[in-house]
Every structure is written in structure tokens, then in C-alpha cells.
Image (tube, rainbow, N blue to C red):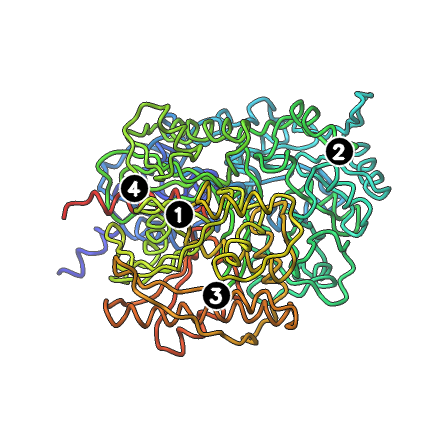
Amino acid sequence: MNGAKAEPDAQRLQGRRVIVAGRVQGVGFRPFVYRIANRYGLSGSVRNNAGRVEIQAFGTSKALSAFLTALLREAPGLSRPQIVTVAAAMPAPTRGFQILQSRNRGGRDANLPPDQSLCPDCLRELRDPRDRRWRYPFVNCTQCGPRYTIIEHLPYDRSATSMAGFPMCPACRREYEDPRNRRFHAEPLACPQCGPRLCLQNPTGDAPLLREQALAQCVRALRQGAIVAVKGVGGYHLMCDAHAEDSVQRLRTRKHRPHKPLAVLFPLAGADGLERLRSDLDPDADECAALLDASRPIVLVRRRADCSLAPGLAPGLQEIGAFLPYSPLHTLLLEDFGAPLVATSGNVSGEPVITDELDAQHRLAPVADLFLHHDRPILRPADDAVVRVALGQPRPIRLGRGTAPLAQRLGYGLSEPVLAAGGHMKSTLALAFDDRVLVSPHIGDLDAPRSRDVYAEVAQDLQRLYGVWAQRIIVDCHRGYASRVWAQATGLPLTEVLHHHAHASALAWEHPEIASWLIFTWDGVGLGADGTLWGGEALTGRAGHWHRQGSWRTFRPPGAERAAREPWRSAAALCWEAGVDFDHPIAEIETAHGAWHSGLNAPATSAVGRLFDAAACLILGLDLVSYEAQGPMQLEALAPGGGEGRAQSLPMRFDSEGIIRIDWMPLVGRLADPAVSPERRAADFHATLAQAALQQALAIRARVAFDAIGLTGGVFQNRTLCNELARRFREAGIPVHLPVRIPVNDAGLAFGQVIEFAASSAPK
């Protein structure tokens, strides 16, 4: 009897109201819902609603069950759907399934989609002479193209993007409205008849070239050694021939960037797209995977011995920042040029990338010979993301185009919306509300007025887009940071978080299964709880409950913040304190020694980053640098890998507060010994720091129990040091972790500030 009744129930018309959250806007999710609803014979509708997707579906229970399964199992590759609720709904007298107009202008549950690289289907069309989008530099579909950089407000509809000014032609309109087409409701949809176009302009204002003529002349100019400012997805790049040393040096001179590495864009070639790149670089399997990721980040890859690229791309370094074309325009440029191109950020060094044509023509006029513009407005900047593989995983150095805004779930709710202001260098912001954190793309160092202006714009933009306004701002304790100065001007309540506590909490959040940590927080500078400049700390505990157990012996580089760009100051301070001669020919040496001796503008620091600076000066003779971490990076490049260094024993002692301090004093003579090769000294330095950390960890473990060790702070961008540490900790049976989702450097501070604030303010 029961069996006889089941069949009619299975065929009875039923209704479901389904709410889906997560990344479901800008990724073809509504068209996908439409297609599977029709596959299972359902009627109803789908619409964007305040950052979520709302589905009304009517059909048999069997069809509805299959539909709900497919909703997650077959979701578009770029989406990250999460079914929030499934509720019964009264069957409606509707026929067919339709996509309804979106409701509201955003919402707390919205997920702002990052910009996406060119998908395989659009790449095939770009290369197909029979296709109407053959060689069209702005081809895209629901699975690729600009997102974050063109959105005016949420929900993500064409009218809410910078494509609103490009009315679709009849052919594009048919694709947009055809549920069988992969461009069904693709909001940036365009073609040569109705979409954006290229324009090549010289600085003198002559009549511009358009479309194919612009592209062809741009390629000719690059072949002749020109520097071209090219407008991309999130801003301008400055491009030149990556094999032409004279062009590279001219770019460096004009941009006032004498040493900082320049990224290189490689054309796609071969079965996996990496054939051309492999002729100059030697990527391992993990680096290949990172290069081919849909976000198309810049990946640091070791040069081959027979690398033919210009030597001046990365002076003193063994790695090149390499990436693959991610937009149709970049793809065409690289394929037509037929060789790698330098593609460095189109900005005045240290400032955010430029996005506006007139601004580019004005600010980049001293650098670029030509400007390849297009007329699709960029509404917000997004510089290229950067990753480096360490301990077998790609780890972000910089969040940017394709990876940001980075949306994460806290796992618990906040009592009020907050905005984390981050630091001063490598700045990002983080907006947190309910159980969500949204980390902005890389903004940059906040020394320049334009950087601070863009920082303020990003802060407003994040809040406006989500319709969430912070009630509190979380700041670093350093009162000189421009991010804190901006926060104070808002008039909102401020909560301070210690620099190194933020670093530690960002890492701890990635591993909620670990209850108790020992985290080494090593970087260049950060104000500590005692008012001194920390940077070599060992913290135990968990987010909201950190205890300083270890550090390094302090030293006093004269000139305070000038030490970051003048490594001789750190080297001289070490030598003077150790009683070793420092005989570098520095004009200010006597004045600096007097200041050091009297303690004038020579604050004490425990920063391992400054130790690296001192070592770079003593080993490489690097007295001055032109970019942050130049000395440590060149020192790492000099050190042979594979654990070849011989560790020197460093003593440890307890200070008056019970902190276990590593004493660097015995290192100084070795670092300054000209009888030992620079390569050997560099390798020994890395090995010595790793061994000292292990000994400190063992000493701390004798006093405090912990479950795992973490490594965070800018010093741990150094892969050689991380490998040395990981090997030693592994042999000691202690698990070790590096950040995977959040940058290990100051770009992760804003996120860490949110985690530390939330943990500190949670009910005890």
C-alpha cells in the first residue's frame, strides 16, 4: 500500500525557495541555474538579491532533488556557491524558467568577483579567423573578463558596470539573451561592432591610430626598442622588449627604478602554454601550476643558466617575476611581438598603478614613448598579484588582479562592522562585518600623496560597495603610519593592535585546528609593547592571547627609519657594538658614530630584517639600496641552496623580563671576514639564523607547551631561510607552517588586525 502511494507523491508538483550565497555574481551563475532548471523541466525564476541568488523552483520532488544536487556539483568553475536555505514554496502558476531583474544595490552577503583571465573558449575565438571576434582585444564571456575593476555598484548587472556606456549590437544582444549561449547574461559582453576599441597615442598629441592599426604600430614600436604604456584590465603597464638591455636600462632611468626587479610577460606557447617561458626559466611543477592558475599571478621563477633575457631585469637576483597573458589584449600583443615583454606597473615608483588615460599621458610622459589606450573605463585599480612557491605551495606576496578583493569567512560573527587600516608599507585594507572579512587589493607604500589618496578611496569604496559602514577602525600601534593618521581623521573609535600580534593572528587563523602556537614574527620593523622596535620575536599562545617568549639582542642603527634604505647604518651599529672595525667610505660616518654613541636618533631594535641588511652590507658591500629588501633578496640569491651553509653557534640569555634573547655578537666577525667567500658567508648566515631559531624554540618548549610552529613577517619571504628552518624543525619532530592564503609580509597586516581584534574582544 505504501509503495503504491509513493509514485503519485513523486509526481506531485512541489516548490522550493533556495537562497545561495558565496561567489555567485559575475561568474555565470544565474545562466547556469537557468540551464539546469530547464534540463530538469522546472518552472520558476532566478534573480540576484542583495548579494545572494534567490531561486524559486517548481517541479516534481525527483526533479527538484536532482536540481539541488547539480546546483553545487556542476556549478561554474569560477563560482563558489553555498546553499544557505531550502524552504518549501507554494507552486506558482508559472510556465518556464526565467531570469528576473536584480533587486537592491548590493548587500552584506555580496561577493565582489575578481577579474578573470581569458578562458580557453574565448582564446579559441580570438585566434579563429572565421569567428566574428577574431583578434578582438576585449573578447569575454561568463567565465572570463573584467569584474572588480569595472563594477560601479552591486548587484553585478551590465547597467552597474563601466560597460553601461557600450550599448550591445543586435548580434551581441542575441547572445546575451540566449540561454544556450555561454554569453547568456555575460555583463562585459562586447564585439568589434559595439564594444571598446584601442587607440595608440604619442605624447605630442598627433592624430591617434585606432583598432588593428594601433596594435600593429605598437608592436612595431616595441620591436624598435620603444617603451609603451599599455592600458590593461586593472591599470597601465610599462612595456618594452625583455631581451633588449638598452630598452630595459632606458626604462629604469626614466622611471627612476635602478635596481628593483621588472616583471616579464611571456607569450603562450606549446601544449601547456609554458614552452616559451621554459626556454629562459626553470619552473618546477608547483610554479607551473601557479603560472597557469586562472588568476594569472606573477610567479617568481629561477632563471636557466642559458637565459637570454636582458641581464638588467633583476640585478643581483636569480629569479624573474614571470607571468602569462591574462587578457585578450595582452595575448594579441605577445603573439604578434613573438617574444617576452617587460610588463611593469604603470606608475611613478611606489605609487598605485595608474588607470586613467589623461593621468597616464601626464604622469607617464617622461617614461613612455607611446600610449596604447582603450576606452573601457577602469573604475578601480588592481595591480598584478605576486606569488612565490615555498615549502611546496604557492604563497601570496601581493594580492591583486585576479586574487582580490579576497573574501574569507571568520567562522564567528563580529559585534560591529570594523575596518582594519593595515600598516604603512605594502598597504591593504580589510572590511569585516558579520562573519566576513574582505581584503582589498595591493595599494602600495603610503609615502606619496597619491598613494594616500588612493588608500582613502579604497577605504570608502569597499564600504560603499557592500553597503556596510565601519563603526570602528583597527590600527597599528605606530603613530607615524599614514594609515593611522588617516584613521584618526575619520573621527571613528580606534582600537590598537600590535604589529607582530597581527602577523601572528593572520597565520593562526589559517589553522584553526592548532590550539597553541609558537610563532616566529621576523620582519624589518614594528612597534612593540615596550615601545621599542620589534622584528625578531617568538610569540606563544593563540589569537588574542600572545605572549612574547623570545627575541634577539637589540642594536641601534643610527638614523632610525633611514636604516631601511641605507644598510651601512645597521652594519656599522653591529660592528661598533661588537668592537669590530667598520671602514666603509661613508661621508656621514663620523656624524653617525657620534649619534650612535650618544643614543641620538638611534632607537634600539630586535629586527631580523635589519640583521639581514647589515649582513648584505658586510658581505656584498651594499651600503645603499633603492628598494625595500634589496639587500636581503640579493643575499639570498648569493647563498647556495640545499642546506650547504654551516651554522655558527649563537648564545642565548634571559633578559630582565625573562625573554630568551639570541645574541648575534659572534656573527659579526664572520660576516666581515674577507678571507671567506661571499657565497660561503651568505650560506652560513642563513644556516646560523635557522639553527638559532631551532635552539630558541627548544628552549621555549622547555618552559611553555605548544602544538606547532609558525613563520610569519616579511623575512619569511626568504625561501632559503624557510627551507633551512623547515628541515631543522622537521628533524626535531615539530610541525611548521607558513601562510598560504594571506601574505606573510605587511600586506597581511590588515587581515591579521581583524583576527586579533575579534579574538581579543570575544567573551572570555
Residue receiving disc 2:
368
Indicate the amino acid at tag 1.
Answer: Leu
Query: In this rendering, which labeled residue sits more in front, label 1 or label 2?
Result: 1
Query: In this rendering, which labeled residue sits more in front, label 3 or label 1?
Result: 1
Q: Secondary structure at mark 1?
A: strand
CB contact under 8 Å: marks 3 and 1: no
Q: Earlier in the sequence, mark 2 or mark 3?
A: 2
381 versus 644 height, above or below: above
Residue 210 location, quadrant? top right
Residue receiving disc 4:
18
Tell me the residue at 73%/42% (across/down).
252
Residue nearer the viewer, 374 or 391: 391
Residue receiving disc 1:
533
Residue 660, position as x, y percentages in the image? 31, 64
Indicate the amino acid at tag 3.
Answer: Cys
Question: How many numbered marks have been drawn onto this rendered protein structure?
Answer: 4
Q: Earlier in the sequence, mark 1 or mark 2?
A: 2
Tell me the residue at 31%/30% (across/down).
470
Residue 713, position as x, y percentages in the image? 43, 53
Q: Earlier in the sequence, mark 4 or mark 2?
A: 4
Q: Earlier in the sequence, mark 3 or mark 4?
A: 4
Q: CA distance from mark 1 to mark 2?
A: 41 Å
Q: Secondary structure at mark 4?
A: strand
Q: Earlier in the sequence, mark 4 or mark 1?
A: 4
Q: CA distance from mark 3 to mark 4?
A: 46 Å
Q: Which disc number belongs to residue 722?
A: 3
Indicate the amino acid at tag 2.
Answer: Ala
